[in-house]
Image (spheres, rainbow, N blue to C red):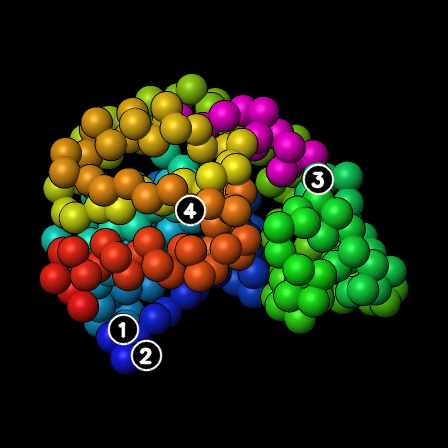
Amino acid sequence: SEHFHVMAFDQRGHGDTDWAPDKDYSRASMVKDANAFTDELGLDRFFLTGMSMGGANSLAFTANYPDKVEALVVVDVGPRVEPKGVKHIRDFMKNYREFESLDEAAAVIHKFNPRRSLEIIRKYTVVYNLKQLPSGKWTWKYDSYFSDGHRKVDLKQMQDELSVAVKKIQCPTLLVRGGDSDVFSLDGARDLQENIPGSEFALVEKAGHSVMGDNPAGFESAVRGFYEKKGYL
């Protein structure tokens, strides 16, 4: 684009990246993957953006590889997340596993999240998030190990570890929260800001947890404003 060369990669077990044979989906391993990805491409210093799981991984990455991150944008996540909101998403993914068609999938997703139009969901969301089974039905690309209850997660331990990590972050940082998010609260955002001195905060209205999908223009405006303020644009 005019200002940046944007790269987006699928973490292990997500999108078109292979599922982990050993079912290792720890944050530490995902952070190592991101480091290997940037090393392979010769990216010595860059701007890092992540949402939800990717946002938590971005916080951990920046804490572990501070020399690589010029500026950080974290979207709707922090050490403190709201269990009810997380459960809401997981229950949806678990209860809707297979769809007869992409049109059916789009209708179901739109009912779950009506903030984005049915047309956009059909054109983009289902195309990039679903894969076709031999039976002809469609299912999520991500490893179902995440939502089948096999992956034991100590939420408190994960929060405590991330709370320690974020205190190491010193680069310019923007925290973005969806105005209607039930996953990342204003209190959670305040806690994170207190642990990253000088960090900025942006509230994007008309957006839930998936901020850039629900209100792309609002998200772009928030990030652009941050980059302009810091002199990157």
Mark seen at residue 92? 3
Sort mark 1 into few (<14), some (14-19) or many (20+) by Cα contacts within 10 Å.
few
Marks 2 and 1 in Cβ contact (< 8 Å)? yes
Q: Residue at x 44, y 61 (%)?
A: 217
Q: Earlier in the sequence, mark 4 or mark 1?
A: 1
Q: Which residue is mark 1?
A: 4
Which stretch appears magenta?
Answer: 80-91
Kindly identify the amino acid type of the residue bearing the numbered disc 3: Phe
Q: CA distance from mark 4 to mark 1?
A: 22 Å
Mark seen at residue 204? 4
Q: CA distance from mark 2 to mark 1?
A: 5 Å
Q: Earlier in the sequence, mark 3 or mark 1?
A: 1
Q: Residue at x 62, y 29 (%)?
A: 87
Q: Secondary structure at mark 3?
A: helix
Q: Earlier in the sequence, mark 2 or mark 3?
A: 2
Q: Secondary structure at mark 2?
A: loop
Mark seen at residue 1? 2
Relative to residue 159, is residue 128 drawn left or right?
A: right
- Single out the residue that lies furthest toward the front: 205
Kindly identify the amino acid type of the residue bearing the numbered disc 1: Phe
Kindly identify the amino acid type of the residue bearing the numbered disc 2: Ser
Q: Which corner quadrant holds the N terminus?
A: bottom left
Relative to residue 185, is residue 93 drawn left or right?
A: right
- Is residue 207 located in the magenta-colored stretch of the structure? no
Residue 127: image x %, image y %?
A: 66, 68
Q: Earlier in the sequence, mark 4 or mark 2?
A: 2
